[in-house]
Amino acid sequence: MSDTKRIWVLIEQEEGKAHPVSWELLGAAQRLAAELPGAVVEGVLLGDGVEGIAAEAYRYGATKVYLIDDPVLNVYRNAPYAYGIANLVKKYTPEIFLVGATTLGRDLASAIATRVATGLTADCTELAIDPDKHILAATRPTFGGNLMATILCKTQRPQMATVRPRVLPSPTPAETGAGELVREPLGMTEADVAVKLLKVIPTDSGEQVDIEYADVIVAGGRGLGAPEGFKLLEELAELLGGVVGASRAVVDAGWINVSRQIGQTGKTVRPKLFIAAGISGAIQHRVGITGSDFILAINSDPNAPIFSVADYGIVGDLYEVLPELINQIKAQRAGHGAPEVAHA
Amino acid sequence: MHAIVAIKQVPDTSNVRINPETGTLIREGVPAIINPYDAHAVELAVRLKRQFGGKVTVITMGPPKASEALVECAEQGADRGILISDRKFSAADTLATSYVLARTIEALMAEGPVDLLLFGKQAIDGDTAQVGPGVATRLGLPLISYAVGVESFDPIARTGVVHRRTERGIEVLQTTLPALLTVEKEIAAIERAPLADVIRAAQYTPEVWSASEPVAFDVAKIGIKGSPTIVGKAYTPPPKKAGAAVKVAEKGVASTVTEALAKVKAAGVVKI
Ligand SMILES: Cc1cc2nc3c(=O)[nH]c(=O)nc-3n(C[C@H](O)[C@H](O)[C@H](O)COP(=O)(O)OP(=O)(O)OC[C@H]3O[C@@H](n4cnc5c(N)ncnc54)[C@H](O)[C@@H]3O)c2cc1C
Ligand SMILES: Nc1ncnc2c1ncn2[C@@H]1O[C@H](COP(=O)(O)O)[C@@H](O)[C@H]1O
């Protein structure tokens, strides 16, 4: 069937565990497929002993998974992964190919696009099908988030895009799912690979928090005044079952680990509740939080730009507001109910 | 030891403003700087040169003005600067850019052996992080992106051990040389240049290569012709409608917080 338009999604995995951005992309691929006649959604999976992940991909909507399973692919390295996938692309000629904009995905997507000589749009925040041209319209922020640009790839195929984790909503998987597994050989041996992984020094486990997938984030900025201010945020975060995040200013100042940084050069988050305390809300920070369901901002400056994206704002000193917030939550939990609102 | 560093002159995006009517960049008064990651790449190259002897070549594709950036690299200790500049290169996307840089590097490799190619992790104007991996792919050389440290480097045995930052930790990778690294800022802290280099740079004029000399680039692969992607439209992101804000100074902290909590609860997003 020559008019089948394959929309491919890289099922990213490391150590046998799929990265959730893969499911976010399968969700997006299905929305695109609905706008593109003849489109089918398929996954691409590489690794060593990772066949089991294909079943997960079916539950998220892939009808077919192309699998290259080979010991050379045991740990991620650019050359064998790019080589294997480029060969799949040449053989099956997908129309669109989506990859997560993770460290692995960005490294890999660029090498694939170069091998097959096609266009790649990095770090997209929105994907759509152009209704007139029936091609992918990939929108991304540029110039530090000041400008949005919609990029098109008119003639070359596939049209490739990377999308950051958490920019798109996570779909709910079906209870069961079935699809077709297509196995392909890698065609490369370990002797062909110039880069060897000697070891991995894990990120300090105390610092390794998954802020991208947290439901509640209590984030602090320079308004905390000193690194000790994070203790207050931790207390509130713990109370709400959330984690602590930060602006770049305080990461640069060394108050907190870079793994907590939110924004254009940090992580994109989409928690249910985002509390910003002492964060001015520069554009580079705002782009990382707009997917949040509810933003509560606390800032002493009524003109702080963070209020422009907040669902609710408190103009005040965070050192007055946060302890009160903690107290009231504790009081409510203890069953005392909220104190009466004193109407002026 | 010969290291080649690819650098880009970029507008300082922390100062960029957009004309809200036209949706275009206001470039006036915005200083052009060396892409910050690239400056650290130059520093690493210069450090290795001091340790092992040899030379550092810096290349950039850009408008005539980008020559300034090469002079700055000479100040930092680079020996040779090449500006690849021609109207025919303009509007290049990352595929066309990686083609031009790869062909340029090939030409330099034909002059003599090269041990290391250094790129920034990404350019802050576009943040794509595609050009470095693209060039490595075109040249068929080992790629280590997001490099944060060089543990060992042996231009005689032609191997190196490099640290790379990923989500799960620091990967320690061994590679053959030449290899291509894209670097984070931690790769090398920028130190003050020795006076001799600053004086030499003041006299230095970088070479200029065109689309036809000394390398004859394939015109179908450069500039707008060689770029599969185009910008369909550009616009300033629409502002989100802001929610209400209450002032502690007006209502007192207790009732302000109570109201805020009620709002959060009403939104039904989390159980308080
Ligand atoms: C290319 C580029 C990329 C960037 N990427 C990122 C990124 O990924 N993430 C990011 O966060 N930033 C990023 N930035 C930096 C960004 O522009 C801002 O400088 C940064 O977000 C500011 O951090 P801040 O809000 O903590 O500090 P500030 O801007 O200094 O704001 C502190 C705020 O605290 C308030 N305040 C002070 N005292 C109190 C108090 N007692 N109670 C309540 N409020 C108080 C002040 O009114 C002020 O609004 C980037 C910049 C550039 C140029
Ligand atoms: N026009 C250019 N000339 C030379 N090097 C470039 C150019 N564009 C990008 N680079 C290099 O590629 C890196 C990544 O750029 P980018 O892929 O655009 O984010 C930069 O840090 C530079 O080292």
Image: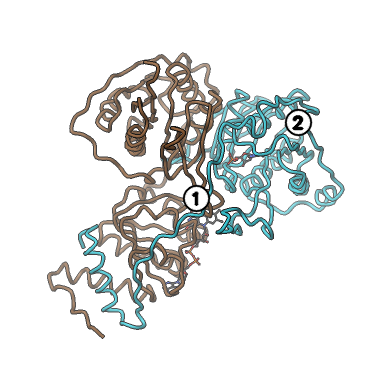
Rendered-image quadrant of the C terminus of chain A: bottom left
In the image, farthest residue toward the front? A132
Q: Give the quadrant of residue B176.
A: top right
Among the chains, which one is brown? Answer: A
Helix, strand or loop at mark 2:
loop
Q: Is residue B44 found left or right of A119 in the rendered image?
A: right
**Amino acid at pointer 1:** Thr
Q: Position of residue B85 (x, y in %)?
A: 75, 38
In the figure, A75 relative to A308: above or below? above
Q: How was this image coloured?
A: by chain
| Mark in the foreground, 1 or 2 | 2
Residue placed under numbered mark 1 in the picture: A265
- Residue toward you, A170 or A139: A139
Q: Chain of mark 2?
A: B
Label 2 CB sits under 8 Å from any ligand 2 atom:
no
Q: Position of residue A83 (x, y in %)?
A: 49, 21
* Residue at 45% across, 22% down: A85
**Amino acid at pointer 2:** Ala
Q: Is residue B163 found left or right of A241 in the rendered image?
A: right
Residue placed under numbered mark 2 in the picture: B211
